[in-house]
Image (cartoon, grey):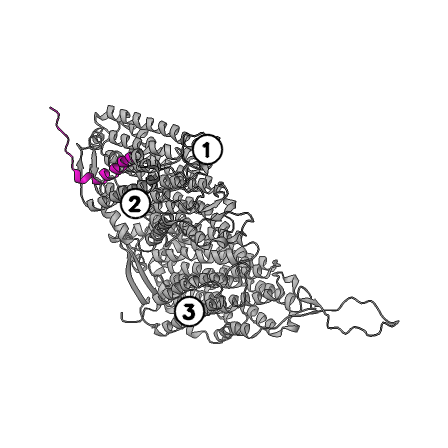
Amino acid sequence: MNSFPFLLVMIALPAVGAAVVAALPRGRDLLAKQLSLGISLVVLLLAVLATVAFDTGGDRFQLTTEFAWIPDFGVQIALGVDGIALVMLLLIGVLVPVVVGASWRDEFPGRSMKAYFAWLMLLEAMMVGVFASTDIFLFYVFFEAMLVPMYFIIGSFGGPRRQYAAVKFFLYSLVGGLIMLAAVIGLYVVSASQLGEGTFAFDALRQLEITPGVQKLLFLGFFVAFAIKAPLVPFHTWLPDSGSEAPIGGAVLLVGVLDKVGTFGFLRYCLPLFPDASRYFAPYVLVLAVAGILYAALLAMGQSDMKRLVSYTSISHFGFIALGIFAFTTEAATGAVLYMVNHGIATGLLFVVVGMLIARGGSRQIRDYGGVAAKAPILAGVFLLAGLASLALPGTNSFVSEFLVLIGSFPSQPVFTIIATVGIILAALYILLMYQRTMQGPPAGVLMVEDDDEPVPSDGGSTAVLTAPRRTLRVLDLDRRELSVVAPLVALIIVLGVYPQPLLNLIEPAVSATMSDLGGSDR
Amino acid sequence: MIEAPDLSLAALTPLLFIFGAACVGVLVEAFAPREARHPVQVALALVGTLGALVSTLLLAGSREVTAGGALAVDGAGLFLQATIAGLGALAILLFAERSLDPARSSFVTSAAVPAGSPRDRELLTSERVQTEVYPLATFAIGGMMLFVASNDLLIMFVALEVLSLPLYLISGLARRRRLLSQEAAVKYFLLGAFASAFFLYGLALVYGATGSIRLSDIRAAAVEDGGDVLLVLGLALLIVGLLFKASVAPFHTWTPDVYQGAPTPVTAFMAACTKVAAFGAILRLLYVAFGTSEWTWRPLIYGVAIVSMIVGAILGLTQTDLKRMLAYSSIAHAGFLLTGVIGLGSSGDGSGLAATMFYLLTYGLTTLGAFAVLTLVRDGDGEASHLSQWAGLASRSPLTAAVMSLFLLALAGIPLTAGFTGKFAVFRAAIESGAWPLALVALLASAVAAFFYLRVIVLMYFSPPAADGPTVGVPGLPTTIVLAITATATLALGIVPGSVLDLAERAAIFVG
């Protein structure tokens, strides 16, 4: 009770920061960047301190803050985290400063950078809120309100087709959210009839006994929203558009954190609240998940645009996460949560590096690059590491989580697991092909410049031969700012690849609690 | 010997205030010198509306039936009256704006001069301003406040006319694009007359069936014989008349034309206040007179709610004029409001009444604000309401674009804005009363409607500004006040709606 309100501060600080950054006078872009970096680092620090304060053997929800918000609706500002939400907060804490650093030199002609950073700060506040809510109404509010900053980030600062991408992103998520709203109200009505007074508090709703028919309807309401957000395969078409048109910072947070709200939602809301319906629908979800793994991987291979390719790889990875969640074993679900974190780090790094390459060449197309590794070995090295982490090479962080998901799913869902394994091979293909085409091979593409330093033959003698001007690849390697942006993610990839135990310790109790809500232990 | 009906003057103060101001306004128009009229009329209209607002607030908690049973003073009536008076005062401020139009007013100087005649061109540039709109608008506000408090079908009809006739007039008073404005006025008048006729015919049938025009007597008769053909037919015709005023599809056809043609401050006034008044009357009629024979009107309301949401949302997508778009938005919102009406419990225990009243307040504030922003964006011949003219507005005037975005997001029902709180309240009421298919349709319609609100934001923020784009006028004090109040309220009712929701909840009582 007397503890520091970590979660409230982690929401309020960036929200206030956003207002301050937005209110800065024109032309103070540098100050806006410094403020944003400072705030995001403080949030990271708070996330770390909150983790230290978190007792892995303690209550399910800790660091709680509760006060009434709209009493007429029975809505509370109720914040609290379990291990799953906590690791997501850590991920947000790490990714936002990285994104601020990665966007430091970005320039958007005719747009003010301070608006970009203000939206980024507001987005951070909402992201923390969505994972830290323990009241479903509050969760819904953050879930929908989060769309607004992301919409402006994509729409104002994105690529050539940003209008289309921004509207598509917003409408897909809004439709899902509205369907979820119906289910949220439905839950409230059920709670009003069972408890006498309607409530949105997660802990109270968990105790409800909902008839199977109603459960199925409510499950679908939540499921569609989360499946669009995650995104699972038939609902995924918005992500490649948004992922490729968003500025790099937006793309990192979009696939790194926002999409995790979907898988987080499965685990936090769908399974514990609607256990019977979850079991009923699990085979269908697994079909979608496995189909997504393979389908998105195949599509990824066919992409010529690097940002689109990375977006498709994410859809494939989300299939693995969904598989882990709907396999209904503690091991697989723990793996899935770890996967959520690792995917955020690995794909975040991949997006950041791709963004650095695009910043140099000005093109998103794979065919516009070639042989970059010869002139920019560090850039290529980081690119390779991010790629390897993304394809889950042993020794990188993603291997641990992918392995856990597969090994945990196998006992309950052998067929789906075996099919999913094919996805690993495809992952190696799409990542390595992209790496090979852009980084290896003969120098080629947009980074080639006419070599005007070539000494001109001094004597126009009889041996003069007309030669085409020599062209060489000119590309700068990562500078100190870029190195400091990628360094934390590189370090995390290796450290978590070798020693994931601290995260697993946080995640596992929460996952076990979720599985016991689901009824029937798997062990 | 005829006994004078009992009259509780205290309970009638709001109405006396507003009608008094309107009558004095007519005298001012006749006797005050021309130069003094504008400030005096504005002050008078504001005193009338604000006085009415304050006196309704002071009456809070009283419950009585007075004026020989013709008027009901109850929580719901007072809440709606306060809403109308408050929104009316804001609309009057928009009327009074003088710094936006180079000709110093958005109203024609002399409506009787034929459009396009030499005299008309001469007056277009003159400094003379029209001041008759203020007493007319005040009468309309008075009519609306009477409308929601009438406990008697005949009074309701009189109020309907008192609020409608001035509206027909002032929607024809646009200073620019006069023919469009006059066409709107004629259309509104003709269709409005039809609706009045429907209402009157329904009234006659109900009287024939029950022998009374008093809502409580009708209720008693309906309990005895709810299935009487005359009664049901009469009810249906009454509802048609009211749905027309509320611009609910399929009785909406006048709305886009009138919203587009009328001077924008008048459109704002109609969109906000008329909606509140019409729904106030619908609530009272259905609740007090026909609360016991729910099954007769429920399917009807259910059906028109769906039609209205779908028509509003889908036709809104195809609009290229912002005023027409907001008109279709108002049709869709009428459907959402009816979703709340469906949530009324027959015995008065449902949360539908409070939810609908709250929604009316939030919708009125938001839509008034949105129209106020429309008055700012202008080109050579008046307001630039074509969508394409709004491209890149954010780079020209970030603040205007931000405020407009706030209103649009609120209309779309995005959380942390007033629009979401209102939507949540009515949808909850509908689902609680078992009408979840209706709520589902409403949710899908809101998603469709969100598309056209978003399109404006896309244009303002993500499109390059057009070369010969409109200018954004610097609003004078009145418009600034309106924008400040509506924007603040839109945010406040989204973030901390508790106290107002609570007020609506406590006010949700009808006396019969």
Q: Position of residue A127 (x, y in %)?
A: 41, 62
Q: Disc 3 and disc 1: Cα gap in Å?
A: 61 Å
The amino acid beneath tag 3 is Ile
Q: Position of residue A77 (x, y in %)?
A: 31, 60
Residue at 41%, 55% in the rendered image = A144
**Element class at badge 1:** helix
Which label was assigned to residue B120?
1
Which residue occupies the foreground of this view, A412 or B413? B413
Q: Is residue B342 visible?
A: no
Q: Nearer the viewer, mark 2 or mark 3?
A: 2
Q: Return the residue found at the far right.
A: A462
Q: Compared to A257, does B489 lie above or below?
A: above
Is B7 part of what is drawn in magenta?
yes
Q: CA distance from mark 2 to mark 1?
A: 35 Å
> Which circle marks residue B86 in the picture?
2
Q: Secondary structure at mark 2?
A: helix
Which of A285/B189 is in front?
B189
User: Quadrant where the N terminus of chain A lies?
Assistant: bottom left
